[in-house]
Image (cartoon, rainbow, N blue to C red):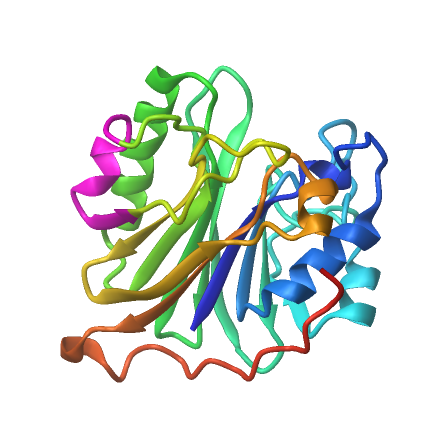
Amino acid sequence: MKLASYNIRKAVGRDRRRDPGRVIEVIISLGADIVVLQEADRRLGPRPAALPARMIAEHTDLIPAPLAVNDVSLGWHGNAVLVRRGLAVTDVARFELPSLEPRGAVSVEIEGRFRVTGAHLALMRRYRHQQLRELHRVLKPHDLPMVVTGDFNEWSLRRGMEELSRGFHLHAPGASYPTMRPVAHLDRFALSHDLELTRSGVLASEIARMASDHLPVWAEVSVSDAGAAALPQAAEPAPLGRG
């Protein structure tokens, strides 16, 4: 199964234009079965979607998981999960995360056999530590194969993720921020110990470099021999879009 994580910056590109069409093109080119988004909704008022669900339905083979708590947002606290058509979403959860500003995480169960959790962590490390402890606490009872992914906002590859490393293998596919000259590995994956990473990367196409201030990261995962029947069959990838 191929997963991707992408901070779309409310669909505002490097040229400061809000262009959800560019974001859609990048998402299509990823060819992922599950795409976890950050900053998918605007921050003010009722938090309307920056990436309209209508555009997703018309141009991709992905469906937003039912995470929004109103009729205008795509996700919750800006976190959204798009799932390949044909993969059943059997459960969703939302977790408040401690911080000076409102933060949260979302979790989606796929066909009762696999769970993906998305988060956008705080800018300050001391709050990220609190948030990771809370994520570890709320996710610990789940015994399914699991991936936690998102914009972790951690610049160091050696420190800052200790709380999550107790139950997960941590992986940074590559430098993803800022798009013009990527130097920081902010966007990462954490895999439960019954999952194996087979391939990963950063999509650094021309359009991806323009569409947001983050490049999307992706990972292909499989279940280890001990739980090989658990992971849903990955769908055939969608045709690649421009870029």
User: For this view, does 80 lie left or right of residue 24?
Assistant: left
In depth, the one of 29 and 74 nearer the eye is 29
Q: Quadrant of the C terminus?
A: bottom right
Q: Position of residue 221 (x, y in %)?
A: 35, 68
Q: Is residue 237 above or below residue 139?
A: below
User: For this view, does 46 lie left or right of residue 109?
Assistant: right
Q: Position of residue 77 (x, y in %)?
A: 60, 37
Image quadrant where residue 17 sits: top right
Residue 64 visible in image: no
- Identity of the residue drawn at 75% across and 41% down: 11
Q: How many marks?
A: 0
Q: Is residue 171 above or below residue 178?
A: below
In depth, the one of 133 and 168 nearer the eye is 168
- Identity of the residue drawn at 32% across and 24% down: 130
Residue 136 visible in image: yes
Q: Position of residue 124 (x, y in %)?
A: 42, 16
Q: Is residue 126 above or below residue 212?
A: above
| Stretch of the chain drawn in magenta | 158-170
In depth, the one of 24 and 65 nearer the eye is 24
162 within the magenta span: yes
Q: Position of residue 175 (x, y in %)?
A: 46, 39
146 within the magenta span: no
Q: Quadrant of the N terminus?
A: bottom left
- Identity of the residue drawn at 27% across and 33% down: 161
